[in-house]
Every structure is written in structure tokens, then in C-alpha cells.
Image (spheres, helix red, strand yellow):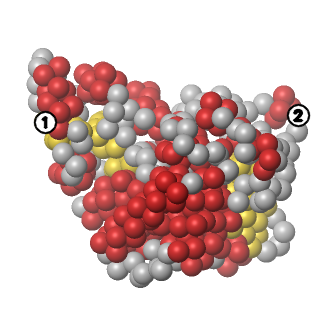
Amino acid sequence: MRALCILGSTGSIGTQALDVVRHNPDRFRVVGLAAGANQGLLIGQIREFKPPIVAIADEDAAQELKTQLGGVRGVQILAGPEATETLVRESDADMVLNAMVGAAGLAPSLAALQSGKTLALANKESLVVGGELIMDLVKGEPDRLVPVDSEHSALAQCLRGERREDLKRVVITASGGPFRGWTRTELAKASVKEALAHPTWSMGPKITIDSATLMNKGLEVIEAHYLFELDYPMIDVVVHPESVIHGIAEYTDGSMIAQLAAADMRLPIQLALGYPDRLPAGIRELDLAALGRLTFEPLDREAFPAVDLAYRAGRMGATYPAVLNAANEVAVMAFLSGKIRLIQIPEVVAAVLDEHQGAAVVSEVSLQRADRWARARAAEILEAR
């Protein structure tokens, strides 16, 4: 039985992970939960799964949680900005699923690996911001870092058992988001409501906006660079509207191996939680005849420049990916608040990247400095606009 600690338990990935646990009670037990919002849902999760430790960043919310859980014994509530890290280090979990959103997920990811646990990673920003630090911790133990993103889960399956020297490139697929086929002029008029209406996946608002700008694909390129030790020219992105093929590996002899599955995040989640076993999924099977055909389109780099910004930051290395991510987080929140247009998100990110003077990533401190600078500069640029 694998003991799990789930970070971001009330979000999209967290709730689906608990659904996987619910359907495999003989394989998993929950020993820790961390959440930042949706207290009502968290209370229900605690009552159902009875984790011995729960972390919540807001101290007032934690006190309210204790009051409402008066009838539930044996649950320790940790509160404060470092509560999640403490949970990760002190729990007796074998595996930590990090489903947090944003750069705040880096410290818990590092804590999981530093404390000897396996990290199932759904928090893109951990690798985008701190890829060098993360990979240093898994040198010689690559199986302690398991991808949860559907694209990287797919690539891991396509690469498994093949010789790395035979690999020519990998292809990350993109649904195209809600604005596939839109021109830059049309994107300038896109509303928040339209941007949040993703055609394939149900996700939180930040990730959904990243899918609308295709920044999420850029972040996934940087993730793939670290996860699979690939140079950036070996990583391509192609638009695949049906979202059936999630990743492709092409080899030097011209062969391509692709992973196909229904667009259901429970599959890559349970592949990660049960690794290396494959569990009965309860996922809808594909009917290839009913699908009829699968289509592919080139990425429109003029309308969606965010992907190339991520390639640029990734190639420059150092603290540039951290700055890319921080500026993007600030710009996305500004768009969700109605302060800027969708097309201004990559414009703000590009302006911040242009001004940044990169520094070597020697510790979390260097990343934190770059992150703070980028957020402050992005806010200044937004104010000026």
C-alpha cells in the first residue's frame, strides 16, 4: 500500500487524484493533505480519507477548520506559509503528489525530494523555475521524479525501453485551446469568459488562461528539457485538436511512437501514483473507428508568441525561466481581473525578459530574488500600460 501526501487537494488534479485513491483503496492511503482554498471541500476530504496531517497556509482559515472538525479525532492541522513544507517533511508518505499552482509549488517539491520521498509532479513551475535544483536531487535516482502532466506522462511511456541514442526528437501536442485558428487581431478582442472556456480539459483559471495563450505548451517544453535531458531543438510542439495523442517520440530510423488515450487526467495521475504498475483505470476506452481521423496543424507562432518566449528563456537558462514564469503569473492575474487584454500577457512577459540580467541558479535564494524582481517589474509595466 502506497502512502500518499496530496498537495493542492481541492484543485482539479487533487480532486481527481483522490478519485483514483477512492477507486483503489487496496493500493493507496492518504497520510497528508494540503489546500489553499475551498474549505468546504477540504473538510469533506478530511472526513472521508482521515489523513493524520493537514496543511493550510491561511492561519485564520486553519482555525476555522479546527472548529468545524471538532468531531474528527487524530487530525493535526498545520498552519502558516511554511505549513505545506512541514507537512511534506513530517508525513510518513512514500510519495508526494504536488498539484499546487504556480511558483509556490517549488519549495514543497524540493522538500519532498530532500526528505527521500518520490515526487509525482503536476506542478509545472517546479521544473520551469527550479529545474536545476530539482534534477540535482534525483541524480542517480530518476524514478523518484514521476511526471503527472498528460504530455510528459505520454513521452515517458514513448521513451520507455528505447535507447536514448536512437531518439531524434519528441513532439508535445496541444489542443490549440479555445482560440485555435484565431488571428492576433481577433485575439485582441477575446474576453475572460471566452478564454476560460477550454474545449477539452477542465482546469483551474490560471492553467486555463495559460492554455488560451499556449504559454502552458511553452512551460511544458522547459519541463521536457529537464525531465528527459533533451536539448531544445529536440522538442517540438504541434497542434492536435482532438487531444487523443498526448505525446510522440520520433527515432532516427523514422519510426514514431505515440501514446493515445481519452482526454482524462485520471489516467496520467494513476500512472504516476501506481508507477510502475498500470491499474484498472475506469477511463473511457478509445474507439478508433468512431474517431474516424486525427488531425494536426502547425503552431501559429505569430498569434501565440508565448511558446517561443519559453524556448527563448529555456535556452538562456540561469534565472530566465523563473522570470518568465513570474511575469506570466502576474500578467495572467491582470487579465483575469480585466486590467489587460489577452494578447498583452506575452507582451508583458517579453518586456520583463528583455530587461532581466540573468544569474546562476545556485540556491532557492537566487530564484527567489529573480522571482521578486520579475513580479515587481511586471507590475510596473502593467501600471504604465
Q: Which quarter shows the N terminus?
A: top left
Count of all numbered marks drawn on residues in the image:
2
Q: Nearer the viewer, residue 206 or 239?
A: 206
Q: Visible in this render: residue 278?
A: no
Quadrant of the drawing holding the C terminus: bottom right
- Give the amino acid type for the residue marked by disc 2 in the picture: Gly
Residue 104 appears in the figure: yes
In the image, farthest residue toward the front: 384
Residue 302 position in % (x across, y down): 78, 59
Which labelled disc corresponds to residue 76? 1
- Please provide percent x and percent y for residue 264: 60, 35
Residue nearest the viewer, comparing 201 with 311: 311
Identity of the residue drawn at 34% across and 74% down: 366
Residue 292 badge: 2
Using residue 186 as the reference point, say whether residue 13 is left or right of it: left
User: What residue sits 80% from the left and 47% below the top?
Assistant: 185
Residue 260, compared with residue 384, is above or below; it is: above
Examine the rendered structure and indicate whether residue 91 appears above or below residue 281: below
The residue sitting at 29% across, 40% down in the picture is 34
Image coordinates of residue 216 in percent, x first then y, are 60, 52
Q: What crowding class fits label 2: few (fewer than 14 Cα within 10 Å), some (14-19), or many (20 or more)?
A: few
Identify the element where label 2 is drawn.
loop
